[in-house]
Image (cartoon, coloured by chain):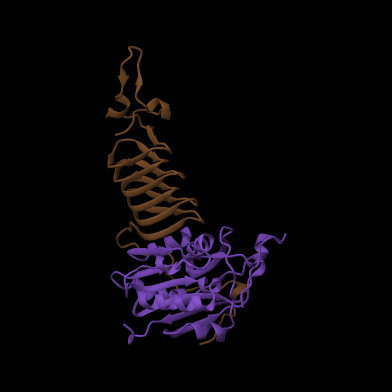
Chain colours: A purple, B brown
Amino acid sequence: MATSITPGSNAPEADLQPEAYTSEILQHLIEPITRLKDGRVLDMGPVCEENIMFFAGRLQKHYVCDMFLRLIREQRVARHSRNVWRHLDYPPRFFDGIHIWDFCDHLDDKKVGQLMKHCLAMLQPGGLLLMTAFEKTPPQGRINAFIIQPGYRISYRVQPHLNLPWHCRHNRALMSLLTGFSIVKTLRYRNGIREILLKKPLSIS
Amino acid sequence: MLGKGKKTESDRTASPDRSGETKSTTFLSRSSTPDAKTVIGKHIAIEGSIRGDEDLQIEGAMKGNIELPKHNFKVGSSGQMEGEITARNVSVSGEFKGNIKCHEKVEVTHEADFYGEIKAKSISVEDGAYIKGVIELDREPNRKPSDTRKPQTPAAPATGDKKES
């Protein structure tokens, strides 16, 4: 299912935002990695200052690659021919963790499969992938950055420069796309947001 | 070093003085006022290294390394810069490819296209900036992150998180 919604109603901004929540799963991702000597996490964006401060304050080095903006730019220049994944040109088994936020909600099934393959390749065996997914397209179809606040509280900030289609999926459809990973934990929040923590099996090098 | 004193771009071009001789001292002087700043204009392209004792702003194209250990460096919104930068504060609004070593703060604005590595004491990033890179912030030794405490009970609307598996 793909829906493309153009912002434009008169509804107050606050009414368009999903409710804030506390991410237990983010803690599951970050705390084991901070205990590593040189833990590496990739944040696929949207880039925002608070998240950079959060990760860079805990890890020696924080890796950022804003795939949301990359996807938009690829679509602008050539709708079909370009390979957006070339921007994920990191060495194999480089990361201990990857946070893709709700990027999958803006990819069709084929592209989600491609993203999963790239994440599998970039992660260490046993490495963790955290994703967020909406159950249905948020009001007005606005894309938000998920802002990490103290105490793993997640709030939102609208990113008006991001205009991507939505591909919200039911649980079964979403899970069927996450091939190659084992599921560590999933949580569904009242605000319609799901968080899924996946692990690259140790058997896959 | 590229300039002396706060001048307009036209001041910086070599120009005849009253005696009719060409002045080039603005390019060569080693002294600078505290607020001195050199701007490399939109239609200038430079390849090479720059060291200096005053602020520098690139609006044109620059390939090479820049060392301004006590001063500020800016890639303006029309600027394109490729190379290594060492400066006190760095601001990126244009295109940047390379590494930044900054003694104080790096600012990346919403117009920026940044590819590379940032080492700094602090960073500010505007929404809309494109960053592909590595960020390393100075951390005080033995400092504990301020928000590693356990997740708190969510505020009322967000309570009732359902655990699925």
- Above or below, A20 relative to B120: below
| Viewer-proximal residue among B71 and A95 | A95
Residue ranking furthest to the front: A81
Judge from the rendering whether residue A65 lies leftward or rightward of residue B63; answer left or right: right
Q: Position of residue A33 (x, y in %)?
A: 35, 73
| Viewer-proximal residue among B87 and A30 | B87
- Above or below, A33 relative to B2: below
Judge from the rendering whether residue A45 lies leftward or rightward of residue A41; answer left or right: right
Total labels: the figure holds: 0
Could you tell me if residue A57 is visible in this image?
no
Look at 35% across and 66% down and name the residue there.
A59
Q: In which quarter of the image is the N terminus of chain B?
A: top left
Judge from the rendering whether residue B150 lies leftward or rightward of residue A141; answer left or right: left
Q: Position of residue A137 (x, y in %)?
A: 63, 73
| Viewer-proximal residue among A10 and A39 | A10
Q: Quadrant of residue A86?
A: bottom left
Could you tell me if residue A145 is visible in this image?
yes
Look at 50% across and 83% down and name the residue there.
A177
Q: Position of residue A65 (x, y in %)?
A: 42, 64
Q: In which quarter of the image is residue A57?
A: bottom left
